[in-house]
Image (cartoon, rainbow, N blue to C red):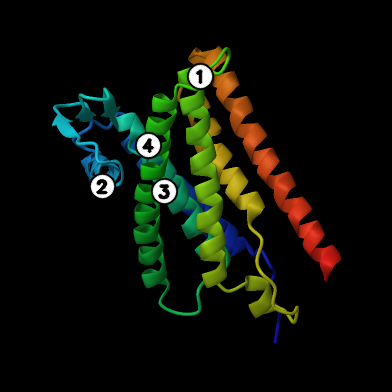
């Protein structure tokens, strides 16, 4: 039987189409209002209420507001960008390591899982932001705004890595199916990092984020430091595992 390449042209084309499609969705929601993002904002506010006891009421055209703590869950806090990153990453993984049957069901399942995972991650991020606000740990260069941005980047990227780890355990390895190489856990760190950087830095740069160069450079350095740090940590962990075996 003829062996298929590990990364074929057809799979590369499928991944390119998926990425282009998700980017198109992102641009369609570029100026989305609170009403258009209510499918993310409302359940997030309910989950935060369930976990914290804080009550949020709809604020017309702005999102969900808690007057006591002066907390607003606005469109910028919807987690839409994170949802689209999960969607693109999950679908690209499914295209790279196609499931054996019912591929349509897999793609729908990944979309539903990405939505649920987005709500869970965004709830954790908002709860952590509330905790940081209450603890008042801002000091010197670590302003409340920077801490808020840093914890958002940290929570979202770590949750993205967790999502990919869980999905990788479900999807079969293309190398295992197409070659005689023994079964091994697929590694997709390059794809995760590339898509994350594309959606968090590449597209905003094209859309004019460079108009605020200081803020964009600071955000870029934070994102790059996190991605590189996670990659190094994973590499060290894998080296330790290989030494043990």
Mark closer to the observer (3, 4): 4
Total marks shown come to 4
Secondary structure category for the residue under label 4: helix
Q: Residue furthest bottom?
A: 1
Circles 2 and 1 in contact, beta carbons < 8 Å: no
Of badges 4 and 2, nearer the viewer stands: 2
Which residue is at the front of the view, 128 or 222?
Answer: 128
Q: Secondary structure at mark 1?
A: loop
Discs 4, 2 touching: Cβ within 8 Å: no
Give the number of the disc on residue 50. Answer: 2
Quadrant for the C terminus, please: bottom right
Task: State the residue position of label 1.
Answer: 138
Residue 119: % across, % down: 34, 48
Q: In the image, is 80 to the left or to the right of 238?
A: left
Residue ID for mark 3: 21
Which residue was labeled with disc 4? 126
First-in-chain label (4 vs 2): 2
The Cα–Cα distance between marks 2 and 1, rounded to whole angstroms, is 27 Å
Q: Badge 1 local density, few (<14 within 10 Å), some, or many (20+)?
A: some
Whole-percent x and y of residue 243? Answer: 85, 64
Residues tagged 2 and 3 counted as in contact (Cβ below 8 A): no
Local secondary structure at mark 2: helix
């Amino acid at each position: 039987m003829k062996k298929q390449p590990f990364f074929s042209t057809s799979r590369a084309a499928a991944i390119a189409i998926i990425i282009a499609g998700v980017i198109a969705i992102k641009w369609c929601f570029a100026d989305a209002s609170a009403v258009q993002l209510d499918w993310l904002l409302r359940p997030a506010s309910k989950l935060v209420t369930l976990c914290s006891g804080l009550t949020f009421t709809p604020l017309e055209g702005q999102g969900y507001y808690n007057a006591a703590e002066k907390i607003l869950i606005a469109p910028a806090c919807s987690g839409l960008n994170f949802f689209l990153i999960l969607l693109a990453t999950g679908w690209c993984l499914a295209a790279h390591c196609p499931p054996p049957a019912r591929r349509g069901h897999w793609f729908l399942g990944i979309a539903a899982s990405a939505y649920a995972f987005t709500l869970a991650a965004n709830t954790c991020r908002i709860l952590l932001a509330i905790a940081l606000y209450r603890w008042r740990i801002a000091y010197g260069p670590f302003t409340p705004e920077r801490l808020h941005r840093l914890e958002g980047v940290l929570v979202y990227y770590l949750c993205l890595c967790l999502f990919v780890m869980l999905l990788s355990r479900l999807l079969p390895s293309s190398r295992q199916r197409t070659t005689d190489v023994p079964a091994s856990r697929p590694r997709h760190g390059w794809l995760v990092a590339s898509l994350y950087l594309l959606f968090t830095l590449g597209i905003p740069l094209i859309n004019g984020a460079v108009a605020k160069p200081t803020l964009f450079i600071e955000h870029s350095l934070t994102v790059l430091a996190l991605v590189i740090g996670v990659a190094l940590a994973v590499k060290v962990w894998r080296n330790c595992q290989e030494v043990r075996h």
